[in-house]
Amino acid sequence: MSTWTRWHGPAMARLWGFCWLVVGFWRAALACPMSCKCSTSRIWCSDPTPGIVAFPRLEPSSADPENITEIYIANQKRLEIINEDDVEAYAALKNLTIVDSGLKFVAHRAFLKNSNLQHINFTRNKLTSLSRKHFRHLDLSELILVGNPFMCSCDIMWIKTFQETKSSPETQDLYCLNESSKNIPLANLQIPNCGLPSANLAAPNLTVEEGKSITLSCSVEGDPVPNLYWDVGNLVSKHMNETSHTQGSLRITNISSDDSGKQISCVAENLVGEDQDSVNLTVHFAPTITFLESPTSDHHWCIPFTVKGNPKPALQWFYNGAILNESKYICTKIHVTNHTEYHGCLQLDNPTHMNNGDYKLVAKNEYGKDEKQISAHFMGWPGIDGGADPNYPDAIYDDYGTTTNNIEDTTNRSDEILSTNSTNKTRREHLSVYAVVVIASVVGFCLLVMLFLLKLARHSKFGMKGQPLYCHLSHHTGSQEAPCQSDTQVGSFLLELSR
């Protein structure tokens, strides 16, 4: 039992893993051409005997060509051609080296599907000509062509231009053979009627309203005569072009807002190189609120939104139907701007149940407006089961002023919303003033009634004379009492008593 456990534990797993690794290398070796060695990411063919006569290919059933990033070929005198479909299976290829071999011809579309190629080394082969069409779609950081018997012609002038424009200060010692079979340094090569072309794009104001149409015109010139074509990238709007020799036009119809900011180029290309003239398309359109959600809590509470529009829309928030005046406690924040799209939130610092309610966002520019509304619940009402009072509105708000918030300035606000504490304090002060006024009115009324009754008592129609009313005149007569002599004195005495 212990032996069975030992062979079916971790040791067995390691043994099976090793076996699969050996099988993998064996299958790759079977798929690898003779005179070559192959791994999961590299192919190298350097054995001249018997050598290879065609570009090495892996059998898809035995290995995965898409994992190959480097191919190294050397001393293969019988390898003369790279065909259009020889390299297309190696989509991840970055480094291609063919040196000291018999390479004479490379098909124009040989590297069409190898967009990851960065380094190409064709040193000491048999190349007499090489077109720039092989490499124009590649972002090469290195192209080494030393030791090839190039013929001096306009076809290789692009190599000279490439050497002059590349960022590296190091240049290759390249030569070509003239009609007299004399080596001419490529840096000194001058060929009549062989130069870079030029492109000139004539366009009206490329600021256009969504749904409209526009036409662009372009002219090219150069010797050799260049070809003209349009590079519109991933333009969404419907478009069509017409070209005639050195003149061309591009018609864009029913322009979409998704094309705002995209670049349109007119390109002139000949044997020596290419030139292009470009413009950016600007599309104006009404705002659209593409996203608005209930508040989320992070460092602050945030009501997230996304707005599209061009020109930049002005944003205005409404709270329970009233204009929301922003402050340092409640304000709009734009976090990400993507040309005509704005991602942000209405930020609230420490909101309470007083901030519960409906929030509506209105986005407006000169082409139209859009609005959306959500309900926000930050906190239940204190002391009430369930957090809500059916007899009291979910939110109380003060009188707001009107403020229009431009999307470019969402953090500087001068107006402030009164806090809940300051509102309650003001109300308590108003109640105190009302109470004092009411009390003073009641006391005054009582005094008038008492004066009226006293007057009636002194002039009773029955001729009844009551006892004289004595006034306490401590502050006038040294704490002695004396009969009140007049109604005024009586009133003064009663007022003294009320105090």
Image: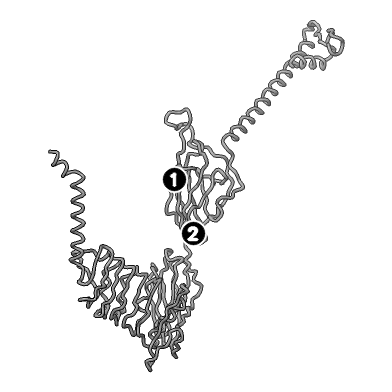
Report the disc number at residue 28: none
Q: In this view, does 43 lie to the left or right of 237?
A: left
**Residue 498 shows in the view:** yes
Answer with mark 2 or mark 1, whichever residue precedes in sequence: 2
Q: Is residue 249 left or right of residue 8?
A: right
Q: What amino acid type is highlighted by mark number 2?
A: Gly
Q: Where is residue 350 in the image (x, y as percent from the top left)?
A: 51, 39
Q: What amino acid type is highlighted by mark number 1?
A: Ile
* Number of marks present in the image shown: 2
Q: Where is residue 116 in the image (x, y as percent from the top left)?
A: 34, 68
Residue indicated by mark 2: 368
Q: Position of residue 4 (x, y in %)?
A: 13, 42
Position of the C terminus, as image quadrant, is: top right
The correct choice, above or below, for 105 with respect to 286 in the image is: below
**Could you say whether the residue bearing mark 2 is in a helix, strand or loop?**
strand
Residue indicated by mark 1: 374
